[in-house]
Amino acid sequence: MAEPVLDIRNLRVEFPTRSGILTAVDDVSLHIAKGEILGMVGESGAGKSMTGMAILGLLEPPGRIAAGEIRLSGDRIDRLDDAAMERVRGRRIGAIFQDPLTSLNPLFRVGDQLVETIRLHSDLDRGQARARAIDLMREVGIPAVEERIESYPHQFSGGMRQRIVIALALSAEPELIIADEPTTALDVSIQAQITALLKRLCRDRGTAVLLVTHDMGVIAETADRVAVMYAGRLAEVGAVEDVIRRPRHPYTVGLMGAIPSLRSDSEELRMIPGAMPRLDAIPPGCAFNPRCDRVVAKCRTDVPHLTGSGAACWLAMEGNPS
């Protein structure tokens, strides 16, 4: 088996506070192969974005990686100092965030921003970097590139701005891209275009992608595998088709039941009762147990871990999947 591009082992992210330590990510282990898209899904507060920020070395103090390790193509990166991590970000790991305006400087033309990013991570001169910027804009589907390269961010639509951000993320030909809710602020038709673009670029370039989202529909259309997170822990991991068609964790079953389907005659969508627990109020045992309609005594006392079943659920482990 080839070495994964991203290999996370037993990652724990903590936030020390006056009232105690809050654990935002707890014992997360996953990997992403070259050319693979791993979707990470869950409600707000599940720990998805925090995992991405830990990989990028962008945890806001006092947040810290308290345990585990993160390896990029075999190189451990979770212990790098700020200067070393800055050389990894952009060059080896690209990032795409939810709001493209937070990634683009409104005072500079998009072409200048692309050129400066390319020059920062390469030995190209300005003319060569500009030619590279034009190629990247064309690759991500920007029309009339020779004219649009002189435009400012506000002169692009939301979908076109996100394409520019994708071009920025690709500018140094990174091994890994962290895409954090890249389609949330876009309408459905533009979402489909952006997800198709990510799939094509991943396939053509062999880039590994961690796609963070709360939208199971985007995961179904884009990812090869999916990791379902709940209250900072992995609830289920598996091939997209397996998880969608045969979910094993009750939380995943609930997520799938909340998606409209043309195949179903039911007019009502299923709803998961309750809400994600606060970090200072995570219940003992399985964190999902207060909201689970299949809870048993063991669920309230013992924490389940991912096993060969692919689900951190006592029912799934005992051969009685949801």
Image (cartoon, grey):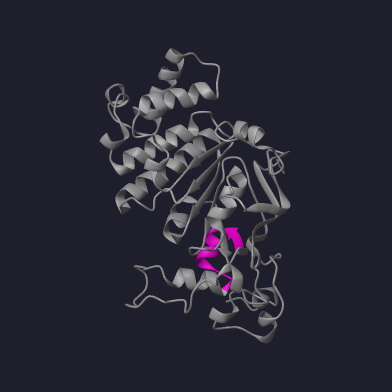
Outermost residue, front side: 18
Query: In which quadrant will I find the N terminus?
Result: top right
Work out whether residue 136 or residue 130 is closer to the camera in this orientation and state it: 130
Q: Is residue 42 above or below residue 181?
A: below
Q: Along the horizontal axis of the image, is 308 left or right of 178?
A: right
Residue 260 appears at what percent x and percent y?
36, 68
Q: Along the horizontal axis of the image, is 195 left or right of 85?
A: left
Magenta residues, start to end:
236-249
Q: Is residue 13 above or below residue 167?
A: below
Query: In which quadrant will I find the C terminus?
Result: bottom right
Q: Is residue 237 magenta?
A: yes
Residue 234 appears at what percent x and percent y?
62, 63
Work out whether residue 160 or residue 143 is closer to the camera in this orientation and state it: 160
Residue shown at 37% from the left, 73% from the top = 264
Q: Is residue 4 magenta?
A: no
Q: Along the horizontal axis of the image, is 179 left or right of 10?
A: left
Q: Is residue 105 above or below residue 300?
A: above
Residue shown at 64% from the left, 32% from the top = 83
Residue 94 appears at what percent x and percent y?
53, 37
Residue shown at 61% from the left, 40% from the top = 34
